[in-house]
Amino acid sequence: MLQKDRPITFVLLILGVAVLFFGTVMAIVLSLSHLTPSLSIGNKIGVIPINGVIKNADAITEQLTTFRNDKRIKAIILRINSPGGGVGPSQEIYSETRRTTQAKRVIASLGSLTASGAYYIASAADEIVANPGTLTGSIGVLMEFIRIEELLNKVGIEMQVIKSGEFKDIGSPNRKMTDREKKMVMTLLEDIRDQFVTAVSKGRNMPREKVLEIADGRIFSGRQAKKIGLVDRLGNFRDAVDLAKKMANIKGEVKLVYPEKKRRSFLWDLLFRDLLDSLINRIDHHYGLLEYRWNGEFSISN
């Protein structure tokens, strides 16, 4: 009786090992596909969202590099909805976008707002698609300082500064800027604006003189921007996807691949991180940062 049971036991053991093996393989495959969705087969377009004030370029430039080196990604769409931000980060993303266009097509899809540094980035793309009502342009640079001199006088606080040079405490919140300081800052701003103009001229293949005519910080609707050459065509995100398919010679359906969202593992991140970032951002705006940023607000209400 025991001998008759042995073949059955042996078969069940083999089946159990096989199920365990294939189950492990499937778990690994599913895990990899979750961590790196770009590994699945099919026609793919990478989509990189650029939202809010641009303060850091690392995540976006890293994603541009990843999509550029992934042969499964046939084209890249920068989905931009931003008032701009820091000069350095905007320039870094612009440079990486220009580098990426040498390898594959990059389309900028403009949301409700793509101004200043955000447009700086968009100008590096092969094509720009905007809604008719998109706010864009604002080619220029600003620098903000906060003054608390009168407040300190009212509460009886006096600040003394010992400095090694005339301009070391330029922009100090406890005093007015001198004429020489204002002139020096203006010279700096003109140089940074000149870099903006040069970038747009190269990215859009526009005469420098034409860019200079509108490089006074003014904003445009998407429809106005198309008329003056800052935008290639009017349309929404789906139109940008169709354009990317056409430019990359993709036939049929396409899979949109987004950067993987990092999971928030701590209660602090979940509840307070966004609020803290917002507060820091507001404080930063008043401490003399050079920014390619539009300083207004835009919304449509009934």
Image (cartoon, rainbow, N blue to C red):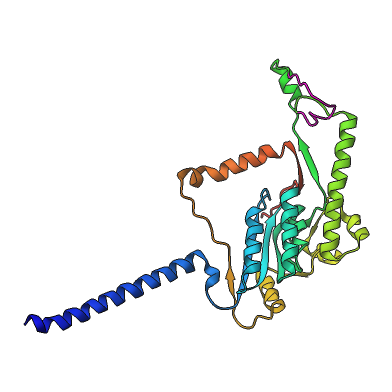
Q: Position of residue 237 (x, y in %)?
A: 66, 68
Quadrant holding the C terminus: bottom right
Q: Is residue 99 magenta?
A: no
Q: At which x and y percent is residue 95? A: 75, 59
Could you tell me which residue is drawn at 74 percent across and 18 percent down?
A: 153
Q: Which residue is more in the foreground, 295 or 190?
A: 190
| Magenta range | 159-172
Q: Main secondary structure of the magenta part?
A: loop
Left or right of 9: which side holds 30?
right
Regarding residue 86, the answer to whether it shows in the image is: no
Quarter of the image with the N terminus in it: bottom left
- Name, please, the residue furthest toward the right: 209
84 and 250: which one is in front? 250
Q: Residue furthest front?
A: 3
Residue 171: say if magenta: yes
Image quarter of residue 135: bottom right
Task: Report the side of 180 relative to 301 (left or right).
Answer: right
Q: Quadrant of residue 148?
A: top right
Percent x, y of residue 124:
77, 62
Compared to residue 249, the image places residue 37 above or below, namely above
Q: Nearer the viewer, residue 93 or 236?
A: 93
> How many marks do you count on the picture?
0
On screen, residue 259 versus residue 143, left or right, reads left
Residue 293 in the figure: left or right of residue 64 = right
Q: Position of residue 104 (x, y in %)?
A: 70, 72
Furthest residue in direction top, as rendered: 156
Residue at the spot 49% in from the left edge and 51% down from the top edge: 264
